[in-house]
Image (cartoon, rainbow, N blue to C red):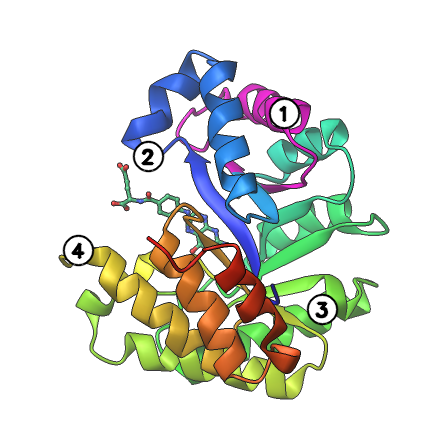
Amino acid sequence: MIMEIVGELINASRKKIRDDIKEKNSKVISKVAKDQYEAGADYIDVNAGIFVGKEKDYMRWLVKTVQETIDAPCCIDSPDPQVIEEAVKVHKGIPMVNSISLEKERYENMITVIKGADMKVIALCMSEKGMPYTKDERMKIADKLVNRLVSNNVAIENIYVDPLVQPIGSGDNLGIEFLNAVEQIHEEFEGIHTICGLSNISYGIPARQFANQTFMIMAITKGLNSAIMNPLDKKMMANIIAAEMLAGKDQFCEKYMNAYREELFNF
Ligand code: THG
């Protein structure tokens, strides 16, 4: 697939898995990693952010546990540069760092971990001024952040800009402003990736999956080429394959045909 999928399920903010992380239940973590990998995840997100003071220890354990089970890289999800630094040390292969932002302290401390290392980096559109709402606010942050990363010798291909999905319930235009930012980022920076935590869009509204699945299709038409999401959502995975074909990203419909043969549309 063109879309790079980051499996979101190993996140301590999820009630369903919180205690399994807390108790270091490697059997459950291994299974959730394996299930996501087999469903098509390219990266496994690991987030232990709720364990204040113990995040570093949990993060190291999560990275090791995931990588003992499957041969896939992790998306190391923490705002704390020290946590990222320690997790990267035990990580095999090329990790994705989630994330750096334009906030002064976070940028300065995070760039020392990233500089010169072979890793993917999520550039989250957040600044001292807080979260962006409009396309223009997102672009102001994205432009500064990408240029700064490039000047710190991070290759454009390794940058995943996250324009930040905001809940549609907080403003009617928050979906379209995000989508237009995705489009403009791809116009301005050839070879760059865009990424997002897709399910933020449906926070606080009912029938969340339906909104998430539809928003994904809309984002693909704007060029979104990676997402932090639940790869066990079969409808979502089928939508991605069809939308990418229809957006001209599947030469000779090959991936779509393969997915059909593998019965990925039978659910
Ligand atoms: N951008 C970046 N990283 C991110 C996000 C983002 N990491 C965290 C998050 N957003 C993406 N990951 C998840 C993981 C799980 C869930 C949502 C996003 C989830 N949420 C349900 C909810 O919100 O109701 C269930 C919560 C529960 O089980 O208690 O499952 O935007 N770069």
User: Three-letter amino acid code at disc 2?
Assistant: Arg
Which quarter of the picture shows residue 11?
A: top left
Please state, as top left, top right, bottom left or bottom right, where the N terminus lies in the image: bottom right
Q: Residue at x 54, y 55 (%)?
A: 5
- Judging by the rendered image, the residue that carries numbered circle 2 is 14
Tags 1 and 3 touching, CB below 8 Å? no
- Judging by the rendered image, the residue that carries numbered circle 3 is 148
- Judging by the rendered image, the residue that carries numbered circle 1 is 69
Q: Nearer the viewer, mark 2 or mark 1?
A: 1
- Give the spatial CA distance, label 4 vs label 2: 15 Å
- Give the spatial CA distance, label 4 vs label 3: 35 Å
Q: Residue at x 38, y 59 (%)?
A: 236
Tags 4 and 2 touching, CB below 8 Å? no
Query: In the image, 127: left or right of 157?
Result: left
Sequence-first tag of 1 and 4: 1
Quick check: is 250 in the magenta stretch?
A: no
Query: In the image, 255: left or right of 197?
Result: right
- Can residue 225 be seen at all in this image of the molecule? no
* Image coords of residue 2 (percent x, y): 61, 67
Which quarter of the picture shows residue 144?
A: bottom right
**Residues drawn in magenta:** 46-75
Disc 3 crowd rating (10 Å Cα; few below 14, some 14-19, many 20+) is some
Q: Element type at marker 2?
A: loop
- Judging by the rendered image, the residue that carries numbered circle 4 is 204
Work out whether residue 229 or residue 80 is closer to the camera in this orientation and state it: 229
Q: Element type at marker 4?
A: loop
- Identify whether 45 is placed above or below 130: above
Sequence-first tag of 2 and 1: 2
